[in-house]
Image (cartoon, rainbow, N blue to C red):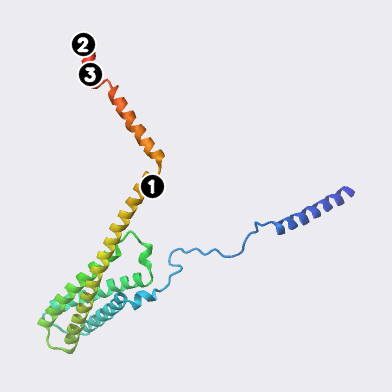
Amino acid sequence: MRSGEELDGFEGEASSTSMISGASSPYQPTTEPVSQRRGLAGLRCDPDYLRGALGRLKVAQVILALIAFICIETIMACSPCEGLYFFEFVSCSAFVVTGVLLIMFSLNLHMRIPQINWNLTDLVNTGLSTFLFFIASIVLATLNHRAGAEIAAVIFGFLATAAYAVNTFLAVQKWRVSIRQQSTNDYIRARTESRDVDSRPEIQRLDTFSIGTNISLGKKSPTSPLSLNHWQRA
């Protein structure tokens, strides 16, 4: 019985000792949640982009393309219909692609995919949309039947062309600036690496030693012309 009581006492003392040591230990398990940004977590709208010129132009392009698409969809009869179908394709494609780019830029999702040159992507989209909207609006204006929906579609088509043209101009400037910054960063990186090599004498000694070793091996190499003549005479 005493041995059992002694064991119970030892167990109580051990448990109390472990509780005290755990309370005084600096390495306590924390219960604070660890924020992990995975997937689409932590998305935030960028108000600076939406307030800027490119953001406002993107919003205007999406609205104008949507209105032009709605106007062309309200037409029930057409003859010929090629111009109408082409305008419908251009307005729908511009609305979808520009809407996706607007979401990517406004939510900074493009920062998570650095493998894509987003400045060049935006430039290609705005340039093609400008050209296609201009051609589609001219064709629809030439082949229209003076219906209200067709006239409205043509007007919004030309407005969308103007918005995309201004965006193309700004995108070209932004793309040139990004190219200049990239070239400047490459030059600074190359200069920094060269300075690091110059400031480390052990690398210079290693290069000098390797050059001297190569020269000595070249002199003693049996494949040199003098060594070949020596072997031929022997």
Label 3 – label 2 distance at C-alpha: 11 Å
Q: Position of residue 210 (x, y in %)?
A: 35, 32
Give the answer, above or below, for where 19 lies relative to 124: above
| Secondary element at tag 2 | helix
Distance between mark 1 and mark 2 Cα atoms: 52 Å
222 lies above or below 92: above
Q: Which residue is nearer to you in this view: 15 or 224?
A: 224
Q: Earlier in the sequence, mark 3 or mark 1?
A: 1
Classify residue 148 by image quadrant: bottom left
| Outermost residue to the top | 234
SS type, badge 3: helix
Residue 15's tag is none
* Whether residue 178 is visible: yes
Residue 7 shown left or right of residue 88 in the figure: right
Left of 203 or right of it: where is 15? Answer: right
Whether residue 1 is visible to the viewer of this picture, yes or no, is no
Residue pointed to by mark 1: 196
Q: Position of residue 131 (x, y in %)?
A: 17, 72
Q: Residue at x 18, y 76 (%)?
A: 133
Q: Is residue 135 above or below residue 177?
A: below
According to the image, label 3 marks what residue? 226
Residue under circle 2?
233
Which of marks 2 and 3 precedes in the sequence?
Answer: 3
Q: Amino acid at mark 1?
A: Asp
* Type of amino acid under label 2: Arg
